[in-house]
Image: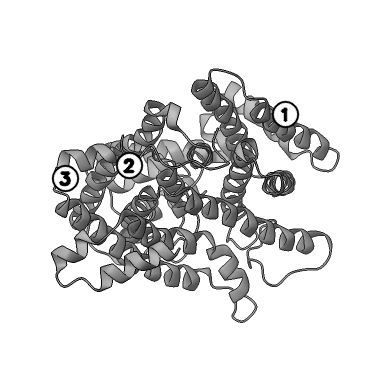
Amino acid sequence: MSDIKSQFRTFIKSRSIGEMFRNTTWEMIECIAFIPVLIFIISPVLQLMINFIFPYDYAFTIDTVSLISCLTGAVAIIMFAGKKIVQKNKLTEVISENNAMFFFLVMIILMIISTCINGFNDYAIHGDSYRNESLLTYIMYFTIYFFCSSLIRSQKLKSTAMYTFIISSILIGVFVIINEFFSPVDLLSQSTTKFSALFGNSNHYGYYLTLTILISGAMFVHEKNNILKSLCLLNFIFNNVILIMNNTFGAYLACFMALILNIIILFIKNRKININAVSVLILFILISLIMTRWYSTIFANIYKMFSEVKNIPTENDNIASGRGSLWKCTIKYISEKPLFGFGVEGIKERLAEETNICDRSHNEFLQYTAFFGIPAGICYLCGVMCVFLRGLKYKLSLDGYSITALVASFGYLVSSFFGNTTYYITPFLFILLGLGLMGNKETINIKEDNINE
């Protein structure tokens, strides 16, 4: 810490812009880039605290968090660019370090073009009143939350991010349990949906539960400190129970598939089966079996899923709880404006009228494509894939935190096949993708600590 302070003092005493960037260190850039990451991770707890004083208003909290994130994120990006310039790094070298960001930048350009073509209406400027996602919000997902988190190589900072997420989810879960079994808690969401916690919808809480379950499950596998390992196990069990009560099957399926991916990643990396990773998957299944005594939702959903798959040739509109009709309509809209889409929320009213189900596609890949066009949708998919392919390329250097971030972000992506982006959950995906991104050949050999395999 004292070394960082001295670095900042040297930076402040710089006499010119060039000297300032020469005095900029990568440790300083990481510290600044970590601010947006940390403040968003604690945003649910901030909302919990705010609810003690003000009525439920998550939009105000995220607007405040976004403002701080934009300011600090912009500083980190400027420092990064300045450092690269004084180091005389070629553009091709910068792109090769983070090729995912290249695709995301192309996507941002396509989003702006789409908005120019479709008009800077109220949706593009402010977003709708429920999800609050404007064009700027989407741009922030990639530039602030993904890029800033991708600059973080410090194991201590990554550890802080993971355990802050775990502790935050435990605090929220405690209030959910109190609300369900003891006394109503006014500090939680005003949604009529059970088990939505601080969020406006139980599906949104399902996303959050997916991430915390997978983070704690993957961290349990790698953690060497017994106290922290016990904390990971406790959180894994605790939030698994809440997930089953939450009854969001897409989130449950995402956890199951991501826990399998955790086993596969460790097998590819170490050329052997990791017993702890297998044990976590078995524990996940055992919790489901035990919970069937009180909640039969999981196996009812599994039966329903297989029934829907069986009836796809004749009743495909009803698959995934009616999402089939949303997907069919969205694909039809994409075919009408394939190049630049309909803009932010451009299919909202039409989709709601034609399906009588929802005004969003309930598939984030289709949503991006319908809003901003097929090229933008392809760029999103390529950017996401680049993160995982880079992990595969540098598999021998994958540390525990990177594996944890990759597993958790994969779980989100599986769940996103059945869901929508939203302003207070989606940034978690981009933060985890960034934390899971492996660095270039020089930065990849970072100092390891007690979590690495």
**With respect to residue 283, does 113 lie above or below?**
below
Q: Nearer the viewer, mark 3 or mark 2?
A: 3
Q: Nearer the viewer, mark 1 or mark 2?
A: 1
Instruction: Give the alpha-carbon distance from disc 1 to disc 2, as whole Å.
Output: 37 Å
The label number, if any, that marks residue 369 in the structure image? 2
- Element at label 3: loop
Q: Nearer the viewer, residue 437 or 183?
A: 437
Q: Residue at x 63, y 44 (%)?
A: 216
Indicate the position of residue 401 as horizontal and vertical percent values.
Answer: 51, 42
Q: Residue at x 67, y 30 (%)?
A: 276
Q: Residue at x 37, y 48 (%)?
A: 150
Q: Quadrant of residue 177?
A: bottom right
Which mark sits nearer the N-terminus, 3 or 1?
A: 3
Binning the other alpha carbons within 10 Å of mark 1 as few (below 14), some (14 to 19) or many (20 upward) gives few
Q: Residue at x 54, y 24 (%)?
A: 264
- Residue 70 in view in this figure: no
Q: Residue furthest right?
A: 293
Q: Residue furthest top?
A: 271
Instruction: Give the alpha-carbon distance from disc 3 to disc 1, as whole Å.
Output: 48 Å
Indicate the position of residue 368 as horizontal and vertical percent values.
Answer: 35, 45
Indicate the position of residue 33 as horizontal and vertical percent values.
Answer: 37, 58
